[in-house]
Image (tube, grey):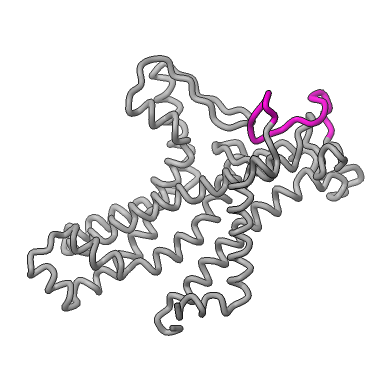
Amino acid sequence: MRRLRHFFSRWQNWIAFLAILGFIYTAVAAPQISPDDPKRPGPFLRVGKATEGRPLPPDEKAPLGMLPHGQDVFHPLVWGARGALQFGLIVTFFTAIFGILYGALAGLIGGRSGGWMMNIADSFLAIPVIAGVVFLQQLWTTTITAMGGLYYTNQFGPVIEIVGPMTPIIWLFERFNPLMISLIFLSWMPYARIVHSIVILLVRSDFIQAARALGGSPWWVIRKHLIPNSLAPALVLAARDVGGVVLLQATFTFVGIGGDSIWGSMLAQGRNWVIGPGGSVLSYWWVFLPPTIAVMLFGVAWNMLGDGLSDALDPQSA
């Protein structure tokens, strides 16, 4: 309770908490806030003419205006919160779980084997994220094509069509997009390094030595002692990563090298209308300003939450 009171004693943490709570509410209540078109369900809603290539300003049908081809701005803005929250939490959860277990195991094993495990983690750090994502995307597409399937992307996200009996790899392909797998594969190393550095100190402590002397298995020691005592810095990193991976997803979607970010897709659809007649950036503000604010606020809120957790979980501040 003392740490919780310390966390909410700062107004910045209140802003982060309320902003994240707002995104969670929007994600959960999206069907009530902006219902789908029963005939064309999905994150994009057409309220104007499909032949209208120019963005239209806000009116009674579209309170935040329309993207090109009559697409409502408000509808994908709301449903984008659900997609961003799902993507950020799923990627961060699996990244953190693998990195924490890997770092704890390497620290507990120690010696040459533990050193080799951390050398492998360091080698992954040398892979540029963009290059790794592009490579894994191509590998994903080539594998699906070799299986006799199709992989393509439309405005509603990636579409996979595979003909044949259900197999474990087909089940994986249909439920996880390649960007999610790529970011998990390329983002676990900071967790491993942080936990490893803490575990190296913990394994020398008396209670760990006693647990091992009494016959505790490595996994039991990791689960009961090492992870609970090294979890605080990993939680701080995870809070910051939720916003970071959503920003990466929106960026990759915008530049067209993967991802199915709804907010990134909104920005991509309106990229040709950012600069209006006479060089004004406010002529078509509804095209880029709402999704840009949403992405920035999402990332800043989670970063502020990470900063607040770092301060609250610091033993010297308790």
Residue 136 horizontal/vertical position (percent): 43, 36
* Above or below 112: residue 89: above
**The one of 80 and 273 positioned closer to us in this rendering:** 80
Residue 250 covered by magenta stretch:
no
Confirm whether residue 267 shows in the render: no
* Above or below 142: residue 199: below
Confirm whether residue 121 shows in the render: yes
The C terminus, quarter of image: bottom left
Residue 212 horizontal/vertical position (percent): 11, 67
Which stretch is magenta? Answer: 37-54
Main secondary structure of the magenta stretch: loop
Q: Residue at x 57, y 42 (%)?
A: 252
Query: Exactly how many numbered labels are in the figure?
Result: 0
Relative to residue 71, is residue 60 drawn left or right?
right
* Above or below 18: residue 157: above
Residue 116, located in which quarter of the rendered image?
Answer: bottom left
Relative to residue 135, is residue 270 drawn left or right?
right
The N terminus, quarter of image: bottom left
Q: Residue at x 76, y 37 (%)?
A: 72
Residue 130 horizontal/vertical position (percent): 50, 45
Q: Residue furthest left?
A: 214
Residue 89 horizontal/vertical position (percent): 48, 51
Q: Residue at x 51, y 61 (%)?
A: 240
